[in-house]
Image (cartoon, rainbow, N blue to C red):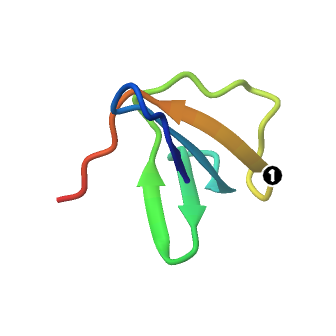
Amino acid sequence: MEKDDKSYSHKLKGKFVDDRNSILQIGEFRIDLSDGEIPKDIIAGDFIEVSVSRFDIY
């Protein structure tokens, strides 16, 4: 995970573990990417990098 110094955006790198529900796994964390547009050629098991405008932990 890398944070942009000038904004709240982050680059996340992880394993796309569930293509039906758009779940990215980074270590023990599972992140829901269903609000984004995932290209159809990315499938479960692929490693991907995504940019998010803000990353909040609840």
Residue type at mark 1 is Asp
Q: Is residue 39 above or below residue 5?
A: above
Q: Quadrant of residue 34?
A: top left
Q: Is residue 36 above or below residue 12?
A: above
Q: Is residue 17 left or right of residue 8?
A: right
Furthest-front residue in view?
5
Estimate the x, y position of residue 51 in percent, counting from the top left: 55, 31
Q: Quadrant of the N terminus?
A: bottom right
Q: Nearer the viewer, residue 32 or 28?
A: 28
**Residue at image location 78% in from the left, 59% down from the top:** 45
Residue density around tag 1, few if under 14, some if 14–19, many if 20 or more, within 10 Å:
some
Q: Is residue 38 above or below residue 42?
A: above
Estimate the x, y position of residue 25 in percent, counting from the top left: 57, 63
**Residue at image location 48% in from the left, 26% down from the top:** 36
Furthest-left residue in view?
58
Q: Is residue 24 left or right of residue 44?
A: left
Q: Is residue 29 above or below residue 48?
A: below
Q: Nearer the viewer, residue 3 or 23?
A: 3
Q: Quadrant of the C terminus?
A: bottom left
**Residue at image location 39% in from the left, 27% down from the top:** 53
Q: Quadrant of residue 57?
A: bottom left
Estimate the x, y position of residue 17 in percent, counting from the top left: 65, 60
**Residue at image location 73% in from the left, 45% down from the top:** 48
Q: Which residue is mark 1?
A: 46
Estimate the x, y position of residue 29 in percent, counting from the top left: 46, 69
Q: Secondary structure at mark 1?
A: loop
Across the whole image, how many numbered discs are drawn on residues? 1
Q: Nearer the viewer, residue 5 or 46?
A: 5
